[in-house]
Amino acid sequence: NSMLSWQRTAYHFQPEKNWMNDPNGPLYYKGWYHFFYQYNPEAAVWGNIVWGHAVSRDMIHWMHLPVALAPDQWYDKGGCFTGSATVLPDGQVIMLYTGVTRDKVQLQNLAVPADLNDPLLVNWVKYSGNPILAPPPGVGDTDFRDPTTAWFTSEGKWRIAIGSKLNTTGISLIYDTKDFKTYELYDGLLSAVAGTGMWECVDFYPVSTTSEIGLDTSVIRPDVKHVVKTSLDDVQTDYYTVGTYNDKKVKFEADNPEIDVGIGLRYDYGKFYASKTFYDPSKERRVLWGWIRELDSEFADIKKGWASVQAIPRTILLDRKTGTNLLQWPVEEIENLRLTSNEFENVKVNPGSVVPLDVGTATQLDIVAEFEIDKEALEKTTQSNVEFSCSESGGAAQRGALGPFGLLVLADEILSERTPVYFYITKGSNGHLKTFYCTDQTRSSVATDVTKQIFGSYVPVLKDEKLSVRVLVDHSTLESFVQGGRTCTATRVYPTKAIYGAARLFLFNNGTEASVSASVKIWQMNSAFIRPFHPEETH
Ligand code: DQQ
């Protein structure tokens, strides 16, 4: 086990051992952030699914708690699958989750805290009337899961959505309830998109069009838009769309049907799945949790004794400059882990060059970088690589006129391992510029049992904006937030040489025409305390 311990992260949430997947039921209660997650207590592979539970004051330092929900009833014998929390105005906490029977039938269930006076909500009670919902007629027994947080309707009821599919159309069913025990199926769908397959972990929430304040799930006002997110089972990818919700018609409509949920925007262009938001009333923000899976082999996971991490929770806002996409940014508390910093200003990186950034060990970093491309070269360049896409390109080794340029993270001194994270600009014959941000893992590790892809996407860059990126490096976990969080890429890398004191950081420019000027600030990051359950510590 210890042989592979360098891959363990220092400030991303992980259980002490074994398998973890989806985030479940995040909530804020009496000064504590609660985080639950799909967990196999017995092995580093998926199975025996229970709800792991941890609490935190700041979503960075954690204390593990006993398992909150385990399969001990006929309706969840096959596993306690994903679900969501609703904190009611009177303080009651409602947990809805999917139970799977021995025969794999998916049923919805209700659980509540055993003692609302316990801020840690250690013990949970399953409702005696469970299951509260079975697949309705026409819906497959194995296509009915992951209830959302409830929101309040103008008729004075609570409403939830549940993901499913009809043939190959992904759908979200709608139920109304007064007491969370009995439900009415609405005979229409919140949303449906042909060809997207099974919708897992549907999420639905409002975002403000006028301020940077996050909103409680029930807020319906003229100055909000709504977001629907779905996790597409077929491609294991989270898609969202921004649109309008009509409470009376119980209908969500995407602003742009061409980028409807499941076919347009992604939260993240790396490996980030089964995500879920919650409203944090203590800081008036909406926060997104997402699961980053392993990209090494199952054999390696078993050997190292654990699998998966959670992404750093992200604050979610509507991008009011574009109006069409969200902005995601690591919660501000992560900045409390920042230790010493190094700053490099206006470093010139010429075409075809690599520049070391001497920051010492480079395995736990928070990097903020800005790039300016030489204006003259930018103008002189004629048409260049209009058909570019990160995943279908040759990666950082493929030279264009205006890129790639960016950083080499988790690199060793001689670059036998390195993960380039970079911008790439294309230019149309009409002079139109398009910017991409990619993460190239093809040279990230000499290990052979690792999936090595090139991730990334187009990113909107508005007039007068500099190119900017924030990169979190945490051993085997890498997260990028581009242009203030317009596009993100979370992934896992498995260097064998670029570890601990041997890991280095570089700037690079593999473009052929333009030099770039880079300004970079780099913080060493402290490790988070993620510790076992000590009840006495909380009094
Ligand atoms: N994971 C859970 C399901 C969900 C899927 C089972 C998404 O409830 O649909 O572990 O990763």
Image: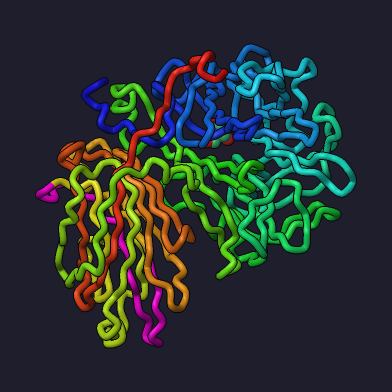
Task: Please tell me which residue is depicted at 23% across the width and 46% down the height of the picture.
Answer: 410
- Residue plotted at (64% across, 65% down): 257
Q: Is residue 432 magenta?
A: yes
Kindly identify the residue that appears in the image at 84 percent across and 55 percent down: 249
Considering every residue shown, the one lying at the far left of the view is 414
Q: Is residue 155 left or right of residue 474?
A: right
Judge whether residue 102 can be spotted in this image.
Answer: no
Residue 297 found in image quarter: top left
Task: Choose top left, top right, bottom left or bottom right for residue 451.
Answer: top left
Q: Where the N terminus falls, by quadrant?
A: top left
Q: Is residue 403 found inside the magenta-colored segment of the image?
A: no
Q: Which colour scheme appears in the figure? A: rainbow
> Is 151 positioned to the left or the right of 512 in the image?
right
Residue 41 image point, x, y percent: 47, 17
In-front residue for pair 348/444: 348
Point out the stretch of residues depicted in magenta.
413-436
Ligand 1's quadrant: top right
From what the image shows, is residue 163 above or below residue 31? Answer: below
Residue 375 location (% of width, % of height):
30, 82
Q: Position of residue 39 (x, y in %)?
A: 50, 24
Q: Quadrant of the C terminus?
A: top right
Q: With respect to residue 35, does 74 lie above or below?
A: above
What residue do we see at 20% from left, 36% from top? 500
Residue 422 in view of the camera: yes
Q: Quadrant of residue 93?
A: top right
Numbered disc total: 0
